[in-house]
Amino acid sequence: MKHFKIFNAGFMLIAAGILFTACRKDPMKQLTEEESRIYITNYDKNADFSSYTTFSISDSVAVIENNRLSGYALTSWDAAFRSAFIQNMQSRGFVLVNRNENPDLGINLSRVYNTYTGVIDYSNYWGYYYDYWDPYYWGYPGYNYYFPPMYGFYEINEGAASADMLDLKNSSSNNQINGIWNALLRGTGVFDSGLISEQVQAVFDQSQYLKRN
C-alpha cells in the first residue's frame, strides 16, 4: 500500500538524520560565554589619532531602547564601563579633561536594548508530514486533507554596549561633529560587571591605531 512505502522511506531518512547529527557537534551549542561575545570596532581611515591630545567622556551612559533614548543612567555597571574607557584612553597617551575645557575628543557611552518580534508560518508543516498517510487509509478514497493556517509568534530581547568617539577639534563650519571611531560590545555576559575591564580592553586591542604616541 502507498502509505507503507512512504512511511518506510520517511523512517529511513529520519534514522539517517539522527545518526548523522549524533556524530556531529553543533558548534553554536559548544560556544562558551566568552566565545559568544562579539567586539566590533570601526574608524575613519582619514583620522590621524596622534594629532589629538585631550579627551572628555560623558558623565553618564545613555539608555537606548528600540531606537529611542529612554534616559541617562550611572549605575555601578555604567560607572565601571566609563572608568574602563578612561583608563584605556590614558594608557594610549590621551589626557582627560572636563568637557568645558575644549577637549579634542569626546566619547559618548550607551547601553542599547532592542526587542525583535516576528511571525512564523507553519502552513508548510502540514504539507510535509500529513500526506505520509493518504485519506484512503481511513476509508475515505478521493478525499483530500485540509488543515487551517497556523502561525507562531516569537520575541527576542538583545542588549549591547557601545561607545562613539567624536572629533571636537575639527568640528565643521556647518555645526557638524564627525564621529571618527566607534565600538560595539554584545553577547552573553556583556553586562556582567566582572567582565567590563576585559571587554573594553578587547575593543582597544582591536584598535592599535588609536594612540597619542
Image: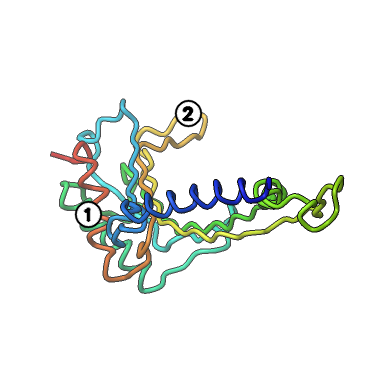
165 or 112: nearer the viewer: 112
Q: In this image, 104 relative to 156: left or right?
A: left
The residue pinned by badge 2 equals: 173
Badge 1: how crowded within 10 Å, few (<14), some, or many (20+)?
A: some
Q: Position of residue 21 (x, y in %)?
A: 38, 52
* Above or below: residue 55 compared with residue 51: below
Which residue position holds label 1? 201
Q: To which quarter of the image does residue 147 belong?
A: bottom right
Residue that appears at 50% across and 64% down: 72
Q: Position of residue 70 (x, y in %)?
A: 58, 62
Nearer to me, 138 or 203? 138
Residue nearer the viewer, 45 or 4: 4
Identify the mark at residue 127; answer none if there is no mark: none
In the drawing, does residue 211 fall left or right of residue 150? Answer: left
Q: Is residue 183 above or below residue 63?
A: above
Q: Quadrant of the C terminus?
A: top left
111 in relation to 104, above or below:
below
Crowd around label 2: few <14 · some 14–19 · many ≥20 (10 Å): few
> In the depicted view, which residue is nearer to us: 105 or 158?
158
User: Which amino acid lies under the numbered mark 1 shown in the image of this protein?
Assistant: Gln
Q: Position of residue 132 (x, y in %)?
A: 67, 50
**Marks 1, 2: nearer the viewer:** 1
**Going 65% across and 47% down the picture, which residue do you hit?**
128
* 61 lies left or right of 208: right
Give the vertical position of 73 relative to 172 (above or below): below
**Structural distance between the alpha carbons of marks 1 and 2:** 35 Å
Amino acid type, mark 2: Ser
Q: Report helix, strand or loop for mark 2.
A: loop
Q: Are marks 1 and 2 in contact (CB under 8 Å)?
A: no
Residue sitting at the far front:
1
Q: At 36% from the left edge and 74% from the top edge, which residue is drawn?
A: 76
Measured as percent of width and height from the top left, residue 169 is found at 34, 37
